[in-house]
Image: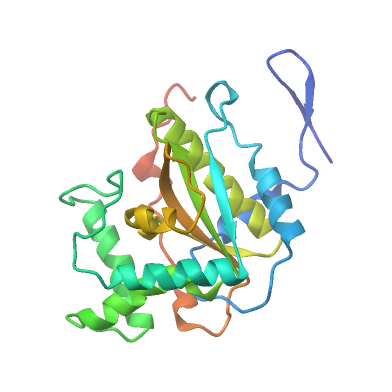
Amino acid sequence: MTHSTTNGNGAPHAGLANPSAVETALTSRRSVRAFLPRPVERSLVERILTVAARAPSGTNMQPWKVYVLTGAVRERVSQALLVAHDAPEGTYRAEYRYYPVAFFEPYLARRRKIGWDLYGLVGIKRGEKDKMHRQHGRNFVFFDAPVGMIFTIDRRLERGSWLDHGMFLQAVMTAARGHGLDTCPQAAFAPFHQVLREILPIGENESVVCGMSLGYADPDAPENRLETERAPLEDFSAFLGWS
């Protein structure tokens, strides 16, 4: 059964017959770090991106661009990034700062927990920096996903457009879940924009926002058993004026 609401012009909007399907897509989304080699049809990726492009943006500017990689191009990008990943620290830098210079609570504890939970699943102990480095390098092979994506934004735009870009990313991941696919959004690509520019036709005014792996999760990979926690509603919300 559906219900109706109205938009700003008074025209009716039909409610969803099965709103739980949307909730399932949202709550089942997770960052998958090991994928099956099973290919993904181009038409399906095109469908996901077309649907995701309905994400809202200020004055409908749609400030997103995506390079969708597979096959030999994806392999070429991965090989170049793995070489860059082994360069001395500080050789490559992102055009924007994703994390604060110094972490503080409650964010520090959350960050540490997911890091050690992941390392524990893949058998990495404290102090094993070489293993940590190799695990981080898995980002650059898109965790073996058949499809890799690189997202960019025009660097002349302001912070509001970056917020809009984030809504597009969320829409991509949610739409993918609706089709039984999994994803992993990856800020790890941002520092290597110079490497990516040597291979991909990234425009002069484009900043690399992040990468994303897309494919079918490997159900047997230990890292895919990672279950992240979320803060309870009362920690991040305030209901005012409710009776």
Point out the residue furthest to the right here.
1
Count of all numbered marks drawn on residues in the image:
0
Q: Quadrant of residue 122?
A: bottom left
Q: Up-down: is 98 above or below 215?
A: above
Point out the residue furthest to the front here.
198
Residue located at (56% from left, 71% from top)? 145
Q: Quadrant of residue 179?
A: bottom right
Q: Quadrant of residue 138?
A: bottom left
Q: Nearer the viewer, residue 124 or 147?
A: 147
Asked if residue 17 lies left or right of residue 132, the reply is right
Give percent across and percent down for residue 56. 58, 31
Residue located at (24% from left, 69% from top)? 87
Asked if residue 27 lies left or right of residue 80, the reply is right
Asked if residue 180 lies left or right of residue 156, the reply is right
Q: Nearer the viewer, residue 33 or 117?
A: 33
Asked if residue 87 lies left or right of residue 159, the reply is left
Give percent across and percent down for residue 126. 19, 80
Question: In this view of the protein, can residue 84 be seen by the observer?
Answer: yes
Give percent across and percent down for residue 201. 51, 50
Give percent across and percent down for residue 30. 51, 62
Residue located at (35% from left, 77% from top)? 135
Residue located at (60% from left, 79% from top)? 36
For the N terminus, the quadrant is top right
Question: In this view of the protein, can residue 142 be seen by the observer?
Answer: no
Q: Up-down: is 188 above or below 138?
A: above
